[in-house]
């Protein structure tokens, strides 16, 4: 558990390593400097190269239930995600990510999106040390997210977004892709 509620930190990550995507962080001079001293003002090193390091000034973790990258692990059948209650998580309540042929049913998702979002709860953000240190807002999803997932069927999910401008249900699709649900 992250009792201090700080973004994920891994002291073993080298300054030129990125666990996200295929970034070559060594190509950015700013990454070495910012990894040693943090950012003075706006960070110049790409956010993917700052994940898990001292210069990370954002939170992308914090999903309640996160099913991810299972499409290549089974050729037949389906993945089921059902009967969960997800609340008080940092960003989303439930995410079905890069997992095809799924069933998402009868989940209860509410009161997620604890990580600050611009334009909301600014007093709490400025008076809470871990929130005040963040320079980037969270994504506008605090409910149930399908992310590049084909052939997913959903029903019986009770989802409430935290704010009126958050998504309770959304689907993210990579450019050039299309999916049938």
Image (cartoon, rainbow, N blue to C red):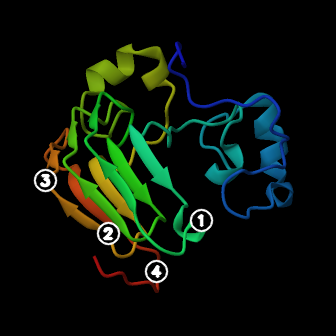
Spatial separation of the CA atoms under disc 3 and disc 1: 27 Å
Q: Residue at x 36, y 65 (%)?
A: 102
Identify the image quadrant of the C terminus: bottom left
Image position of 40 (left or right of 150): right
- Residue at position x 74%, y 62% from top? 23
Circle 3 SS class: loop
Q: Earlier in the sequence, mark 3 or mark 4?
A: 3
- Image quadrant in which you'd find residue 123: top left
Q: Circle 2 — which element?
A: loop
Q: Is residue 140 visible?
A: no
Q: Dot 3: within a 10 Å radius of its alpha carbon, few (fewer than 14), some, or many (20 or more) residues?
A: few
Contact? badges 3 and 1 (CB < 8 Å)? no
Image quadrant in which you'd find residue 126: top left
Whole-Å distance between the Cαs marked 2 and 1? 16 Å
Asked which secondary structure carries label 1, the reply is helix
- The reply to whether dot 2 and dot 1 touch (C-beta < 8 Å) is no
Q: Viewer-nearest of labels 2 and 1?
A: 1
For marks 1 and 4, give the CA distance.
24 Å
Please provide percent x and percent y for residue 21: 67, 61
Q: CA distance from mark 3 to mark 4?
A: 29 Å
Which residue is tagged 1?
73
Residue found at x 35% / y 62%: 146
The residue tagged 2 is 152
Q: Position of residue 166 (x, y in %)?
A: 22, 49
The percent position of residue 176, horizontal first and vertical second, equals 46, 86
Q: Residues within 10 Å of mark 4 (few under 14, many from 20)?
A: few
Q: Which mark is residue 156?
A: 3
């Amino acid at each position: 558990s992250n009792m201090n509620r700080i973004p994920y930190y891994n002291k073993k990550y080298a300054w030129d390593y990125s666990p996200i995507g295929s970034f070559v962080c060594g190509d950015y001079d700013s990454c070495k400097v910012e990894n040693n001293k943090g950012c003075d003002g706006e960070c110049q090193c790409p956010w993917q190269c700052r994940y898990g390091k001292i210069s990370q000034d954002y939170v992308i973790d914090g999903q309640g239930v996160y099913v991810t990258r299972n499409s290549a692990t089974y050729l037949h059948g389906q993945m089921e995600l059902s009967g969960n209650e997800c609340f008080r998580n940092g960003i989303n309540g439930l995410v079905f990510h890069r997992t095809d042929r799924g069933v998402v049913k009868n989940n209860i998702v509410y009161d997620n999106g604890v990580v600050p979002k611009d334009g909301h709860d600014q007093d709490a953000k400025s008076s809470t040390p871990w929130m005040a240190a963040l320079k980037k807002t969270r994504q506008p999803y605090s409910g149930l997210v399908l992310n590049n997932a084909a052939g997913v069927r959903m029903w019986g999910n009770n989802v409430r977004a935290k704010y009126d401008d958050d998504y309770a249900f959304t689907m993210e699709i990579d450019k050039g892709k299309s999916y049938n649900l």
